[in-house]
Amino acid sequence: MSRWNILVGGPTERWPEILKNDPKAIPGNWIGVDRGSFRLLKMGIIPKIAIGDYDSLIASERDWLEQNVKDIRYSIPEKDDTDTELGLKVALFDVNASEIVIYGTTGGRIDHELVNLFMLLEPRFRPFAERVTLIDKQNTIRFYLPGHHTIQKEPDKKYLAFVSLTKVDNLTLFDEKYQLDHFSSDDPISWASNEFIGDHATFSFQSGLVAVIQSKD
Amino acid sequence: MSRWNILVGGPTERWPEILKNDPKAIPGNWIGVDRGSFRLLKMGIIPKIAIGDYDSLIASERDWLEQNVKDIRYSIPEKDDTDTELGLKVALFDVNASEIVIYGTTGGRIDHELVNLFMLLEPRFRPFAERVTLIDKQNTIRFYLPGHHTIQKEPDKKYLAFVSLTKVDNLTLFDEKYQLDHFSSDDPISWASNEFIGDHATFSFQSGLVAVIQSKD
């Protein structure tokens, strides 16, 4: 049980600064997915595990990967799993990561972005949703199962959003700038542009899956 | 009944090329929301209607807006409606637009992006979902109510995705590269990276709201 980072192939301009400028300062082991593995190597980070069909790499790039990564796995192109799902399966079911931080999930194609947001709804991943964080340049996205939760403000983020990805029952925001009292909805909804009062916030809900996004302009 | 375009305040690097390089070639009238109104003026397009709280504009920018736009409307800051919802309300209920194309909805803050995707689930907007298109640099997003639909391939787009934003019943993809046969789900799901076979595609579903995304790398 430990922290594992996953790098998938989203556009580098959406990466957080630390990944661009000082990636070795990020704690934990790395899983590279497809082009993500190659990008890690280029930054001097050898992924513990590489997975993908590598169809976006040229032969010399593949060779370099194969010479440097000990545990390299080949997925079948046009398979059912997306790149992010491939990485998440390894992190959850092969190395039993307690904390999984995924980079490269946003920007570019919206269909990919939505896969990355909705994948935690799948029955195989859903019980583990709270282990997963998606991070990009302006956003930190965490996922919560029903219950009562406390979240810490990140110093560089201003905004707080509660996004019900499913039907939700009795979503209550206790101490945020804008509060909710037992809100229920049959459809997804994004309660955006909320803010912390102080350095933490508490909320609860009884059924559904809620993404909490801390963001900055 | 006619085409109206809405420009909201998302990052300009996510704009489609035509909006950046030749905005006057885009047919229809314009509604500018908040900073979007100012950006339209800077491109030489006078919005028929401007709406927003303009809290992101400095005084001289506001003055310029007030001198140039005949129909300028002031919304209340920290109101319940988001910028995009303000624009959409005007387009649907004040000018009865038959076709509404919204620019500036993606990039940057994910909570904003999700508001823009989920807003058409709201009862006030939902009956009109099929009038609305979101366009950015790599994606065209349309929304469909239950029924049988045919969509045309856009020449510059390669990928096709079907994103159920809600519970969905009997989603069937008849003639796409990857087909679905009466797929039902209680939760949202993004069927990404599909493709057209030929220049059109047909699909149907019996309940829910489905976003169809054409995209390119």
Image (spheres, coloured by chain):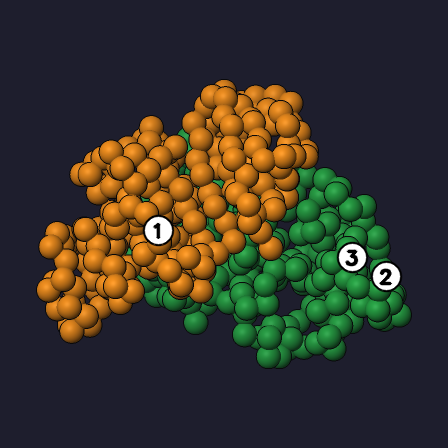
Chain colours: A green, B orange
Callout 1 environment at 10 Å: few (<14), some (14 to 19), or many (20+)?
few
- B216 horizontally vs A197: left or right: right
**Quarter holding residue B101:** top left
Looking at numbered disc 3 in the image, what kind of residue is underneath it?
Tyr
Q: In the image, are marks 2 and 1 on the same chain?
A: no
A136 w.r.t. B102: above or below: below
Looking at numbered disc 2 in the image, what kind of residue is underneath it?
Asp
Callout 2 environment at 10 Å: few (<14), some (14 to 19), or many (20+)?
few
Q: In the image, are marks 2 and 3 on the same chain?
A: yes
Q: Would you name the residue on which mark 2 appears?
A: A71
**Callout 1 secondary element:** loop
**Quarter holding residue B107:** bottom left
Q: Would you name the residue on which mark 3 appears?
A: A54
- B76 horizontally vs A167: left or right: left
User: Viewer-nearest of labels 2 and 3?
Assistant: 3
Q: Would you name the residue on which mark 1 appears?
A: B26
Spatial distance from mark 2 to mark 3, Cα to Cα?
Answer: 14 Å
Looking at numbered disc 1 in the image, what kind of residue is underneath it?
Ile
Callout 3 environment at 10 Å: few (<14), some (14 to 19), or many (20+)?
many
Spatial distance from mark 2 to mark 1, Cα to Cα?
Answer: 51 Å
Image x and y of residue A152, in percent: 46, 63
Q: Which subunit holds the residue at mark 2?
A: A
Toward the viewer: B63 or A150?
B63
- B53 horizontally vs A15: left or right: left
Q: Which subunit holds the residue at mark 3?
A: A
Toward the viewer: A97 or A71?
A71
Residue drawn at the location 33% of the way across and 31% of the way down = B128
Spatial distance from mark 3 to mark 1, Cα to Cα?
Answer: 39 Å
Residue drawn at the location 37% of the way across and 60% of the way down = B22
Image x and y of residue B109, in percent: 42, 59
Q: Which subunit holds the residue at mark 1?
A: B
**Callout 2 secondary element:** strand
